[in-house]
Image (cartoon, rainbow, N blue to C red):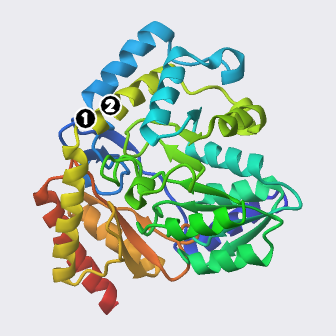
Amino acid sequence: MKRAASALEAALSRLDAAQLRRARTTVERCAASDGHALTVAGGRELIDFSSNDYLGLARHPALAEAMSACAGRSGAGSGAAHLVTGHGTEHARLEEELAAFTGRERALLFSTGYMANLAVMDALAGRGERVLLDRLCHASLIDGARLSGATLKRYGHADADSAACLLAADPRHTALIATDGVFSMDGDLAPLPALARAARAQDAWLVVDDAHGLGVLGAGGRGVLEHFGLGADQVPVLVGTLGKAFGSFGAFVAGAAELIEFLIQKARTYIYTTALPQPVAAATRTALALAQKETWRRERVAALVARFRAAARAAGVPLSPSTTPIQPVVLGSPAAALAAQRALQEAGLWVVAMRPPTVPAGSARLRVTLSAAHTEAQVDALVEQLERASARARSA
């Protein structure tokens, strides 16, 4: 695109015409720790059904207290990269605790999940090699594959046979297979046991980004790998985020000691960025302990998911086959999804419409997310409004 205001205006006009232009909403205030409400610009209080705060920990007072106390000791910022003077005691302790939680030898902190995925893909693949990605992988895995210089091949969504065929076609040059553990827009699970068998048979890395599974799935909340009974031998590279079920911020990669040491040497998004502030790491340590101690949070969100799905099916709300806290209601067109978002907002519910390119064309949706902080009455009210919105979408 040439540097011209008219070019930018034309591009924005095209987005407007297709109802694909994104807009931010300012949240002025969040509810106390025992609720899941937020006040948006203009003072309107809404029940939030779009947050990834699955365990209801983001506004827990213990996290705020841990963050405040650490800030008093170490300051607000780290001041430098981990390999300079930015690596503190809270970082080291959190990495040890994340390694223990995931059953890995070591863990390495990153400032964001996006940076963690870029690091893994760029470090483990390169020119002359191939990487295989699920067609609905998160954008960070796609961008990481492109930055690596490797040839990117996409296999059918959650189709392990398709992945195995691509791998078998050129096993010598295929460095890795990468996938979300829980897909962020659909809430379904990757077929990890089959992918693990295919990758191991050809000595390829299997990278799993379990951003939406850790803390929620599995008997101990250890995510989609625990759900499937898979260990480090089957899935050697695990990526997790800390800003979803654990309610804070940041991300990590967990794996064998030599893998983590290699990333420290080669991962550009680790080497060349300021370390996560220590108060954030302190809050995350508190959240990790709470998630393991207060198992009722995981049990409650699972019960609310079951309640939502049963009521939505009875009401004729179109549901995707997801048993996770991510419950997409696919309405088709961007116009239908935006209209449903506005209707729910008028009813006091905040559910954001997801449109292309975030989701495939023709599958614009309301992405409902459930949290342990929700009440049964709030879930029932949501279903009532979704029934009306989906009926309007069908008749439009």
**What residue do we see at 78% from left, 37% from top?**
266
Residue 68 coordinates in the image, percent (x, y): 37, 17
Q: Which quarter of the rendered picture does the C terminus lie within?
A: bottom left
Residue 365 appears in which quarter of the rendering?
bottom left
Whether residue 357 sits left or right of residue 271 in the image: it is: left
Point out which mark residue 293 bears.
Answer: 1
Give amino acid for label 2: Ala
- Quadrant of residue 5 in the image? bottom right
Foreground pick, 9 / 344: 344
As drawn, is 52 to the left or to the right of 16? left
Residue 14 at what x, y percent from top left? Answer: 64, 73
Could you give the CA–CA distance between mark 1 and mark 2, rounded to whole angstroms? 6 Å
Nearer to the camera, 18 or 160: 160
Where residue 114 sits: x, y (%)? Answer: 61, 47
In contact (CB < 8 Å): disc 1 and disc 2: yes
Residue drawn at point x = 69 percent, y = 34 percent? 270
- The residue labelled by disc 2 is 289
